[in-house]
Image: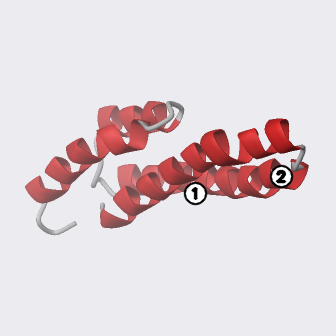
């Protein structure tokens, strides 16, 4: 569960950097490479989040409903930060994770 939380928050930060830093650099200053590199990193982290979520669900550490909420939250800017509290509560209710 800790790996899932860290991955989710890291992906959330990458999404905000893409939207709030890289895109203004591209469209405001014409620096296309910003979106290329940050977009690539964000995409890789998004895929990693999906894999980690799936692994947590298969390992019975994460219920299907909460896994779906994690996936939906990843699509919303700032969503992973709002869902982290719920993941933390779930993690604390399962001391072995």
- Return the x and y of residue 93 as percentages of the image width and height: 9, 54
Q: How is the model colour-coded?
A: secondary structure
Q: Earlier in the sequence, mark 1 or mark 2?
A: 2
Q: Residue at x 58, y 52 (%)?
A: 14
- Determine crowd level at label 1: few under 14, some 14-19, many 20+ residues with C-alpha closer than 10 A: some
Quarter assignment of residue 40:
bottom right
Residue picked out by circle 2? 36
Image quadrant containing the N terminus = bottom left
Front: mark 1 or 2? 2
Q: Secondary structure at mark 2?
A: helix
Q: Secondary structure at mark 1?
A: helix
Q: Residue at x 79, y 53 (%)?
A: 34
Residue picked out by circle 1? 48
Q: Are marks 1 and 2 in contact (CB under 8 Å)?
A: no
- Return the x and y of residue 74 as percentages of the image width and height: 49, 38
Q: Residue at x 83, y 52 (%)?
A: 36
- Return the x and y of residue 89 as percentages of the image width and height: 15, 49
Using residue 30 as the reference point, say whether residue 48 is left or right of it: left
Examine the rendered structure and indicate whether residue 47 appears above or below residue 1. Answer: above
Q: CA distance from mark 1 to mark 2?
A: 18 Å
Using residue 64 as the reference point, say whether residue 86 is left or right of it: left
- Return the x and y of residue 54 as percentages of the image width and height: 47, 50
């Amino acid at each position: 569960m800790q790996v899932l939380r860290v991955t989710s928050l890291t992906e959330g930060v990458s999404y905000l950097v893409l939207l709030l830093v890289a895109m203004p650099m591209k469209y405001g200053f014409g620096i296309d490479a910003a979106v290329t590199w940050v977009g690539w990193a964000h995409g890789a982290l998004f895929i990693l989040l999906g894999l980690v979520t799936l692994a947590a669900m298969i390992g019975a550490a994460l219920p299907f409903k909460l896994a779906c909420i994690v996936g939906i939250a990843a699509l919303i800017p700032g969503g992973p930060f709002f869902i982290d509290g719920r993941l933390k509560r779930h993690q604390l209710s399962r001391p072995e994770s």
